[in-house]
Image (cartoon, rainbow, N blue to C red):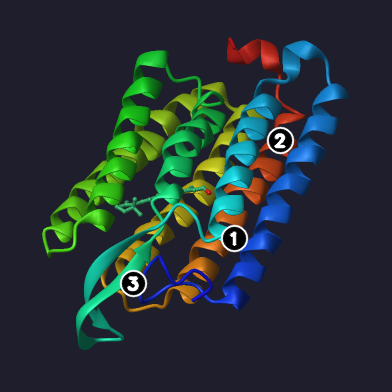
Amino acid sequence: SINPTVADIDITTGASSWLWAVFSIMVFTLLITLGWAFTVPPGQRTFHYLTIAILGTASVAYFSLAADLGATAIPVEFLHGDPIPRATRSIWYVRYIDWVITTPLLLLELLLVSGLPLSAIFGTIFADEVMIITGLVGALVPSTYKWGYFTFGNVAMFGVFYVLYGPGLASARRHGGEIQKTYVTGAAILSFLWFCYPISWGLCDGSNTISPAGEMVFYGVLDILAKPVFAMIHLFSMRKVDYAALRL
Ligand code: RET
């Protein structure tokens, strides 16, 4: 453990180096997006601004993770399936502070292209917030009640997926052309990646099956794909979309 005051089971210095690398990726792509925003007319920067907010938040979050801050010690019952009496594991609650800000913004990037009414977009963001907050509470609960919160979170996530593949897809299809293409690509990437987060939660925050170093790799790869990679693909396909058709 590089920070012995945190918990018995904590990250290694190797995991910390990886986290500094992810931090650098977040800052680098943030700067690229900032520069890119200046090259397009002010009326067509909505998605650049959203991306800047997402990557700025992720940069601060990864700074915290790499410095081994934003965690608290939570009692765990098992390590790799074996009982361990009175041991604690670091739970990085700072992740959830990042996600409660950035996942609604990621959904906005996608849903602002769907043509759905604002009421539907707000409803989806509400379900998203339920998903993240129940995940946070579940991670902090030491008893098996944590799996109750995990269940609520998964129900909320499937609520989000329902909107993406039900009314969202129908609305994008009505618009057709580049709007439909951009929406369908974004929805497919987003839903595939988001589906992997509860798997990581179950193996890390939930059951302590994977070590914190492994957790940093699992969530880290997902975060790189779900934030900078998703946003870059989205910004590229937005170049062909007619902004006037979006009513932004
Ligand atoms: C939790 C646990 C509770 C159940 C579910 C979860 C889903 C989390 C997701 C997070 C997405 C984060 C992203 C971050 C960006 O980099 C909270 C893990 C369903 C989908 C996209």
Q: Which residue is mark 3?
A: 203
Judge whether 159 appears above or below 114 on screen.
Answer: below
- Which of labels 3 and 2 is toward the front? 3
Q: What amino acid is labelled 1 in the image?
A: Ala
On whether ligand 1 comes within 8 Å of the CB at mark 3, the answer is no
- Decide if residue 17 is on the left or right side of residue 123: right
- Decide if residue 113 is on the left or right side of residue 88: right
Task: Say if mark 3 contacts mark 2, CB within 8 Å.
Answer: no
| Residue drawn 56% across the image and 62% down it | 220
Image spot of residue 2 (x, y percent): 53, 73
Q: Residues within 10 Å of mark 1 (few under 14, many from 20)?
A: many
Q: Which residue is mark 2?
A: 235
Q: Alpha-carbon distance for marks 3 and 2?
A: 33 Å
Instruction: Name the residue nearer the viewer: 32 or 179.
Output: 32
Q: Which residue is mark 1?
A: 66
Image spot of residue 111 (x, y percent): 49, 28
| Residue drawn 38% across the image and 51% down it | 93
The residue furthest right is 39
Q: Alpha-carbon distance for marks 1 and 3?
A: 21 Å
Image spot of residue 133 (x, y percent): 29, 41
Q: What amino acid is labelled 3 in the image?
A: Leu
